[in-house]
Image (cartoon, rainbow, N blue to C red):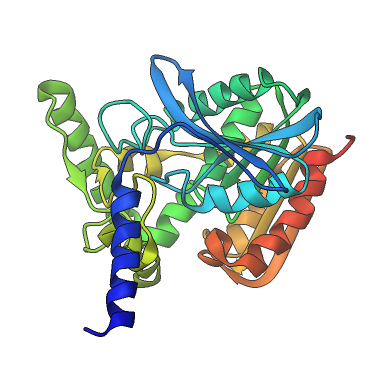
Amino acid sequence: MDVTRRMFAGLITGSAVAASLPAAAQTTASPMYEVRDVTFPSSAETLAGKLFMPPGEGPFPAVAVVGPVAFVKEQSPVQYATRLARQGLAVLIFDPRYHGASSGEPRRFESGEAKIEDIGAALTFLSAQDGVAQDKLGVLGICQGVNWAIEAAVRDRRVSALGIVAGHYLTPATATLYLGDDQAIAARMERAAEARAVYEKSGEIRYIPIIGSDEALLTAELIAQWYAPWDNRAPWFAYRGGWENRITAMSEEVIWGWKINETVTRLQTPVLMVHGDKAASGPMIPRQLFDTIPAADKALHWIKGANQLQFYEDPLVIDAALTPLAAHFKKGQ
């Protein structure tokens, strides 16, 4: 191995080792924003997050971000947080309970109700921070996070603005789109219900992979390719966060059984929906849901040609989404 190759191997291996170590509480700063490692309570659990604060004294509008299914904060949420902070917003990203660096058992359980509670806890934490405008608390949902963001906005009057990006909207139509037919949906729901019954009776936790098999939660090859570096913790990728390629089997009962199409008919919070031609839920379901939202202040921003994974980390697509999102969250400032 020549010197250049040895140096490169050492660099990427060192990055991987460093990424595997527990993160120390710290504050980092740039001319554009300050980042603080934070923890805060949600019910009986402790959530780990990062708070992004713009320079200056504020008060700043604030946004809590909730990401895709089984996400950790180091994935798409951080991409939106840095950009929103540059636009003058305080932003909180966090690992929901059961995931990443946050507490909660069973690990990797997707609970819609728990995530909705966690969003409320995030808003409580934000409202207690110096420099945050308590009357301007927003919620941003990405992919499957749109469902819990919508539910939080309907239930919690503190939410003054809602942003929903590239939504994997949990509706019966979406379940059919992803799984194929009623028989396939029923099979997934039956497996999940059985896993829940086993857990409730014995404490045994059954898991399925998120990607990588026909039994996985997400079976599309393109999605598997995107998550692969998170799964194998590739050294070149400088793996960070606590993402694991597994989810409790009983989680699918929540995922495929939720009906956000019913909740959106009660949404009165000012809302901006951002979507693309090839994003999750397809092009029709989001438009149909948008039409049923009764909020007087609502807008749909369409990014032509954008696919789902571009909304996770493509800087051009994210920047195109951020311009209207920042204006939406700062409205009336």
**Residue 140 in view:** yes
Say which residue appears at 28% left-offset and 63% top-offset: 13
Q: Residue furthest bottom?
A: 2
Where is residue 22, by image quadrant?
top left
Say which residue appears at 62% left-offset and 55% top-offset: 286
Looking at the image, which is closer to me, 262 or 303? 303
Say which residue appears at 29% left-offset and 58% top-offset: 231
Relative vertical location of residue 131 with respect to residue 249 in this rendering, above or below: above
Looking at the image, which is closer to me, 173 or 300? 300
Q: List x then y, in percent, for residue 156.
A: 64, 22
Q: List x then y, in percent, for residue 6.
A: 27, 76
Q: How many marks?
A: 0
Say which residue appears at 36% left-offset and 61% top-offset: 227
Q: The C terminus appears in which quarter of the rendering?
A: top right
* Side of 43 where 13 appears, left or right: left
Relative vertical location of residue 137 with respect to residue 284 in this rendering, above or below: above
Q: The N terminus appears in which quarter of the rendering?
A: bottom left
Where is residue 316, by image quadrant?
bottom right
Q: List x then y, in percent, for residue 251.
A: 31, 39
